[in-house]
Amino acid sequence: MGFHTFDPAETDRLEQPTRFRFCSREELLQWLPGGGTLLDLGSGTGFYTDELAPFFDRIVAFDLQPAMHRQYRERGVPPAVRPVTGDAGTLPFADGAFDGAVSTMTFHESTTEEGLRELSRVLAGGGTLVVVDWSAQGRGESGPPRAERFDAADARSMLDDAGFDVGIAAERSETLFVRATA
Ligand SMILES: C[S@@+](CC[C@H](N)C(=O)[O-])C[C@H]1O[C@@H](n2cnc3c(N)ncnc32)[C@H](O)[C@@H]1O
């Protein structure tokens, strides 16, 4: 899968506090284990990584596009965060390297069967995955065209197939929310 990748020339849009309308720090922390090592998959310029950094021992901010990490470094990367560039289809980490993983507004861009198997591999057994993304069932008032999105049922099915235990796969007004364990 994987529709168009977010244009680094438009990253101003990733820095807007109005984004909390669709995904907040508090809801991510409600479901992610505190402490330990977290993988932020498709971290962009680190908007949510920065929000989460005070609550984890270490976060890997993983993104396909070097331009995203360049902009993140220009703004300032917190000491607990390590930016790593690469493709979600082949994660350069050891088996069970992470206690948890989070992915915000990226699932529709980055997801492949291979990538989800990789995500399962790098999470420790019982490790938590939280996904928030634009939903194909959403209103379309913000975010990419609905034709480029998955819905919560799609996400559940893809994660099931990759061996995750999906506890929550919910539709909201514009976004989907998934909590699964490896
Ligand atoms: C819409 S941005 C969201 C960024 C960040 N999660 C946020 O919410 O601010 C999607 C990000 O996913 C990254 N991405 C897309 N495909 C990817 C892949 N195959 N592997 C890693 N990152 C990917 C893009 O480069 C982009 O930075």
Image (spheres, rainbow, N blue to C red):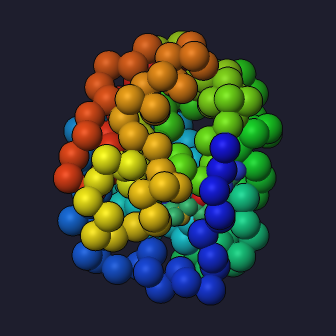
**From the viewer's perspective, is 15 left or right of 111?**
left
Count of residue discs: 0
Where is residue 175? Give x, y as percent.
Answer: 31, 51
Viewer-nearest residue: 99 or 145? 145
Establish if 46 lies above or below 126. Answer: below
Q: Quadrant of residue 105?
A: bottom left
Establish if 157 lies above or below 77. Answer: above
Where is residue 97? Give x, y as percent.
Answer: 65, 28
Can residue 55 be seen from the camera position used here? no
**From the viewer's perspective, is 26 left or right of 122?**
left
Q: Could you tell me which quadrant the N terminus lies in?
A: top right
Q: Quadrant of residue 115?
A: top right
Q: Quadrant of ligand 1?
A: bottom right
**Farthest front residue?**
147
Q: Which residue sits at x=29%, y=53%?
A: 138
Establish if 171 lies above or below 3. Answer: above
Q: Which residue sits at x=48%, y=22%?
A: 157
Can residue 177 be seen from the camera position used here? yes
Where is residue 159? Give x, y as percent.
Answer: 51, 24
**From the viewer's perspective, is 127 left or right of 115?**
left
**From the viewer's perspective, is 22 left or right of 114?**
left
Viewer-nearest residue: 147 or 65? 147
Q: Which residue sits at x=62%, y=41%?
A: 111
Establish if 73 lies above or below 171. Answer: below
Q: Which residue sits at x=68%, y=29%?
A: 113
